[in-house]
Amino acid sequence: MVWTQSLHGEHFTFSSVKQVLARASEARSGDEQAGVAAASMRERAAAKLVLAEITLRTLRESPSVPYEQDEVTRVIEDGIDDRIFARVAGWSVAELRNWILDDDTSGEDIARVGRALPPEGVAGLASLMSNLDLVLAARKLRVVVRCNATLGLPGRISSRLQPNHPTDDVAGILAAVRDGLSFGNGDAVIGVNPATESVDNVVAILRAVKGLMRRYLVPTQNCVLAHVTLQMKALERGAPLDLMFQSIAGSEGANRNFGVTVALLDEALDMARRLGTAKGPNVMYFETGQGTALSANAHHGTDQLTMEARAYGLARRYEPFLLNSVVGFIGPEYLYDGKQITRAGLEDHFMGKLSGISMGCDACYTNHAVADQNDQENLEMLLAAAGVNYLMGIPLGDDLMLNYNTTSFHNNAALRQVFGYRPTPEFEAWLERMGLWRQGRLTSKAGDPSVFDARGLA
Amino acid sequence: MRIVPLAPKILACRELPAADASLLRALGIDIDRFGSLGLLTCDQDDSLYVALDHATKFAEVEVQFAKSFYAGSAHASGPFSGEILGILGASEPDSIQEALIAAARALEEDICFYEPEGGGPAFFPHVIGETGRYLSAQAGIEAGAPMGYFIAPPIESTIGLDAALKSADVKLVRHFAPPTETNFGGGYLSGELHALEAAARAFTDAVLDVADKPMAGMRRPSHMRW
Amino acid sequence: MSQRRIPAFLEDLIATPDSKRLVSAYDAPAPPAHPTPGVEAPHNPAFLERLMKATPSRVATGRTGTRYRTATYLTLRGDHAIAKDAVEAEISDELAATLDCVHVVSRCSDRAHYLLHPNEGRRLSDESRRRLEQEGTRDVDVQVILADGLAAPALQINGPRLLPALTEALRARGISTGRPILAKMARVGLQDDIGVLLGARATVICLGERPGLGTGDSLSIYLAIGPKLDQDNAEKNCISNIRPQGLSPEAAADGAADLLRRGLDLGRGGLDLV
């Protein structure tokens, strides 16, 4: 198919759905690097006009990678309920946007349809939405999930406590855990990135964190973010594991680069449900990021927004408890500055929620991107307004192991204060019992990790 | 005078996941509650006592047996004897595993004797932040309370304890008059953590002072009688 | 790897033989003093001190409401400035003059371009290509390359010691090296382009790591056996964290030379070497 569009007397031609999607996507350095971005703002505007009139049926029939060639496409396509899809197949992307933003359309209405949308449609929709559109629409889309605790309820925001240590020293990790808990962080998960990937290390850290959780009866989940095969081996060794983690992307080739296949993820989910320590039923944790497929040279000429939407299409097969994009980590060659990182964070969150996923975000930046703490805090605030399920939590936002900057313990507390949000209900009750939280706010004891000095701890 | 740490070495570590009932009885172990055993020998007895106690904080285990050997590591009965045998008991092998790992880790990182750089008396100025179930019972203090565990050779430990007790608000809750099985002396102290740390430093300074001036007591009296 | 923790009340007594002190030999800034707890009236001061000593993470900094104390915030801003400046910095002319190397640049025009175009940072400029053809040493065992990477200060600080240590360590293992190369605006993959051009059997590139807050002094070494363009990272070996508070250049040089010797004997690198 070919589309032409004129804009103030200038004519633009687009020769495929893939091209329309890529040219219509907001400006970002990764698409420029891939050579798929619009050449000018006028071309972008024209592409959006074309995209607005394309139907969801056409988008579903134009997967970014053919069905026969890519298992991500197959998982997504086979997972779409044709009866639900039939209701919206004839809608244009513009009609979809209008319907989603309409006051008479509830979150439940959208949720029913959301799971049947192809990722190319989800990404196309996001490209027609302004930042405030993305915030408002996402706010309607509650996704509530359960592991040991209940995440995603309205009026609440949670955090992943990320107590990384440059040499995986257990005492150092637990020191940071105490600091974060004292600020009311950690109700989504206590998730550690190990500096050294080994089964012994994964087992030791899972046990240490679980040990602290058991001693203080903290109602949360533990997780070590090593390769999924190492976590599976740890489970076989009897390590206590609540959430099973893996990084995923939007194409089979990109996932292969991570050492991941659908079959492996299926096996991981099964093991987590059988051998894991969580109540469940949601036991998976995924991380994604715009630009991942391009960096693995497995994007198939697709723009990074669409590739990201495909990752969510894959993820929903596993009904994850947590999924967050790590939006500013990949580097300025994919998302150049605060503006692009912010836009991507809002897009990812909306697309994830629309896809029916319990969506969080690692609102972050590296020191070689054109961004600073103010940009990062802007994104946190926008995501909080949008109803993000969780953000990261790190001492002062400075991760010494991964060398990047993200949300801090203080910032998560401040966001709750600004928006009047609370933690998960189980965690809130626990914070109150610990004397750290009362009547919707932190007490004067909060922020002091030494309150966790009870008997029997290292 | 500077000091160097003397790293303790575990010489042997074995498990009996389902120990023989009559052996358990002979060792005075409650067979219903502690059918699985973990055994350790070490070349530093006091370090292992602390490590065993530490292990009770990490797993559902209790110290069933812990004894020092006469004359210490220098006169060990065999290559794997060291100067102490410690035995942990649990109702299941997994707990023993967790406990042994915790004990080994603690010995690697946190517990050791010291001696002056260049050689001299070995001493143990150890402060435990939160006792486990074993040493607290041995000392007659509440489990989880801090404790001082100070050991040195006979004259050093006596001078050392005197300095420690005078330095801070601490109490001597158990005294080991020399000679112990390994020919050392010392004691357990109770008090607030910061006081115990001050006492440990005072103990150390006193031990080093004895090492520096061992004959300081031989002074010519100001008024000679003969 | 666990290390023995010395209790605070004994720290000043511990003997530290001078030959093992890494920091004293460096012309690098002294490590920051251990931060004092910012928490007012902590529940357990002694325990709080131990927690802070257990990790380099910025824990127990205190708060004003839910925000950082002013001193904390300004420290953070200062540390970010150090990191940003490290990213933006270029290899100084003095360093370039003191190290006897062939000077090359990648296809990037400036730092901003470099940050946005990693592929361009993996290929030599046409002029550098010509220069290497004339001045580079051909067919050596190992071509040594020093580069800025994402933090030129890391090379400034560690380079002057690393280069002679590496050359000597390789020579001692019977490995020929030829004239080293100093590369500007280089990504790791530039070693592939250089290796193929000069016909080296292996290449080793030493370049600055992406800085974290308050740092910019850390160098990584990447070894590639049997250079080929866009070689997979899985086929290379990496030694990282070479910096005044981390691995010494001499230790890194020995480690790299050992790996290179094994790799040259085996004919390949990557996981097979470790």
Image (tube, coloured by chain):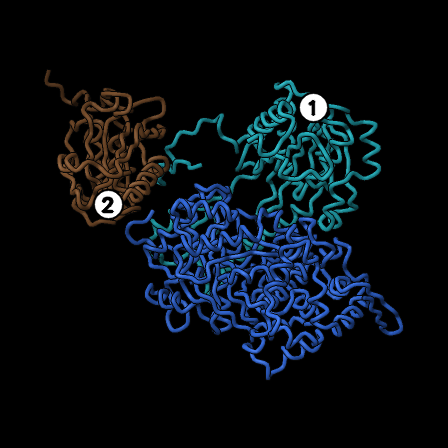
Chain colours: A blue, B brown, C cyan
Q: Is residue B168 visible?
A: yes
Q: Position of residue A6 (x, y in %)?
A: 86, 72
User: Is C10 situated above or below C75?
Assistant: above
Q: Residue at x 43, y 43 (%)?
A: A169
| Badge 2: residue crowd in 10 Å (few <14, some 14–19, many ≥20) | some
Residue type, label 2: Ser
Residue situated furthest right in the rendering: A9
- In depth, the one of C191 and C54 nearer the eye is C191
Q: Which residue is mark 1?
A: C141
Between the residue at mark 1 and the residue at mark 2, the CA separation in whole angstroms equals 61 Å
As drawn, the label of residue C74 is none
Q: Mark 1–mark 2 contact, CB under 8 Å?
A: no
- Report the mark closest to the observer, 1 or 2: 2
- In depth, the one of B187 and B29 nearer the eye is B29
Q: Chain of mark 2?
A: B
As drawn, the label of residue B91 is 2
Q: Is residue C53 visible?
A: no
Q: Residue at x 70, y 52 (%)?
A: A333
User: Is B200 situated above or below C253?
Assistant: below
Asked where in the image residue A381 lies, by quadrant, the reply is bottom right
User: Is C169 situated above or below A322?
Assistant: above
Q: Position of residue C134 (x, y in %)?
A: 83, 27
